[in-house]
Image (cartoon, rainbow, N blue to C red):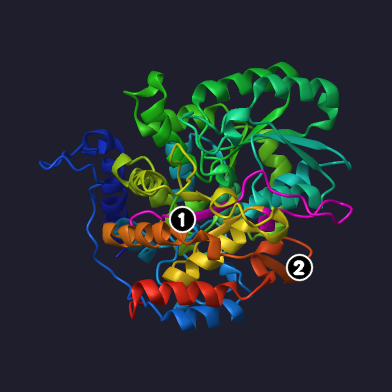
Amino acid sequence: MNLLLQYLVFLIFSSVEKIFFMSKENSLKVKFYNGENIPLELHKVRIVQKLNLVPIERRLEALHEGGFNTFRLSTKDVFLDMLTDSGTNAMSDMQLSAMMHADDAYAGSQSFFRLQKAVEDVLKKKYLLPVHQGRAAENILALAYIKKKGDLIPMNYHFTTALAHITQYGGRIVELLYDEAYNISSSHPFKGNMNVEKLEEVIRETGVENIPFIRMEASTNLIGGQPFSIQNMRDVRKITDKYGIRLVLDASLLGENAYLILQRESEFENASMADVIAIMTGLADIVYFSARKLSSSRGGGICTDDAAIYRELEALVPLFEGFLTYGGISVREIEAMAVGLYETLDETMISQSPQYIAYLVNALTSQGVPMVTPPGVLGAHVDAMRVCAHIPQTQYPAGSLAAAFYLVSGIRGMERGSISNQRDEEGNETYADMELLRLAVPRRVFTLSQIKYVEDRMVWLNENRLLIGGLKFVYEPPVLRFFMGGLAPVSDWPEKLIAKFKADFGDSL
Ligand SMILES: Cc1ncc(COP(=O)(O)O)c(C=O)c1O
């Protein structure tokens, strides 16, 4: 029995490793005879889930029940769920089969050792601390390293949960992007680059002793899933070496950042995903990730090659997460994480979502919808500041657009604007640099006709944008308010939008 099990495990992992080594050959570039440039899926669908598209009247009721906050919608009322890619990417047959041979044990599980091997093979880090999701890693890093009030964490840009954990322990952040990153319509290939000149200035002004670490986020989420280049990371590393400051890489969207490096950074045009990922992780002292994104599973991890760092963080895992070989998640998910990490090296898999995003962004841009460009990863981002230029930031244009888009399409996107920001220490609003509606495109989940439906409804809404009105808070939680906050429309704009929808679409859903 034992031998049979070992054989099965060998079979799964040897097939996964095959993908890992063959990924370059498999990334076929297929041309269509009719000249159309559309993404072609290199997978087939074997398990499906039925979807519902409820009538527009029910969608309005659902919005009222959910406080005009798409996080609070129930999926029974959602047609295409474009809220996030977190935990919603399709899993592979390899991942599902690996979950069946998980080794249930409180301590010393073989599943953990398989994950550790995947981390060594793919992320090239020796030590791994498993955690239940990305923000748990952020909690541990903030708790371990923010030692005094006012400690500063420079970063290319914040992510909501990273910021919340840093400020929770008395820290502050400073965002150091180049100006081009704030230019929504741009052709700059690496808007996620850290501004290295400003970084050095900040270090000199603040003092090394007040900077516990520098954080770089791959495929910078909140500015539209925009990558940084390896050259930029090398430049940052030179500075961290010069001043002796730890470099922390948020690798939650590492695969996509690496894929865009292969596409956009000439030095790496003939490199493999494995090479690029190894260079990126090799430049960081600590790599942490949300496996919900990185490996299409659940969980997360903190990895390092430095035994001293490992020792500093080790005790916090059993305190907050669980024993060091399961980190608060099921061993089944640990198996799926391990396989998912290997699959991250498969360009045909990792490119699927960015290619769909590029298709959608290009289609919408060509029909006049203002989008974040160049197309990034994770999702297509609509510039709500321009679509809803008539709605002041005090009435949350991105939240209003998210609610209006759900109303006219049944598609749930996510507000990434001022609602997602937290208030400052005095309780004042801090308005976001960008008001975006993010339409997430999880890996290998949607079909092209569904993407065309997204395009169709967004073009219609953009043409009827003046009917969209603002929102106001009626319930505002003190932390991460965007998750559970409740809002209401400032006027009867939803009813007017429905009337126009009915006039144009008749009895169509
Ligand atoms: C860049 C980035 N870092 C950290 C996190 C937090 O991960 P999790 O949702 O697993 O806690 C996310 C989640 O979306 C993310 O996008």
The answer to whether residue 82 is visible is yes
**Amino acid identity at mark 1:** Ala
Give the residue pinned by disc 2: 477
Q: Position of residue 154 (x, y in %)?
A: 72, 33
Q: In terms of image quadrants, where is residue 342?
A: top left
Q: Pick whichever of labels 1 and 2 is earlier in the sequence.
A: 1
- Specify the quadrant that holds the N terminus: bottom left
Vertical relation: 129 (above or below) 88: above
Q: Secondary structure at mark 2?
A: loop
**Amino acid identity at mark 2:** Pro
Front one among 51 and 6: 51
Front one among 482 and 298: 482
Give left or right: position of 254 versus 80.
Answer: right
Q: Secondary structure at mark 1?
A: strand
> Is disc 2 surrounded by few (<14), some (14 to 19) or many (20+) residues within 10 Å?
few
Q: Position of residue 67 (x, y in %)?
A: 64, 75
Q: What is the span of residues highlighted in magenta in the rendered image?
A: 418-444
Q: In terms of image quadrants, where is residue 122?
A: top left
Give the residue pinned by disc 1: 440
Q: CA distance from mark 1 to mark 2?
A: 25 Å
Q: Which mark is residue 48?
A: none
The residue that appears at 29% across and 51% down in the rendered structure is 10
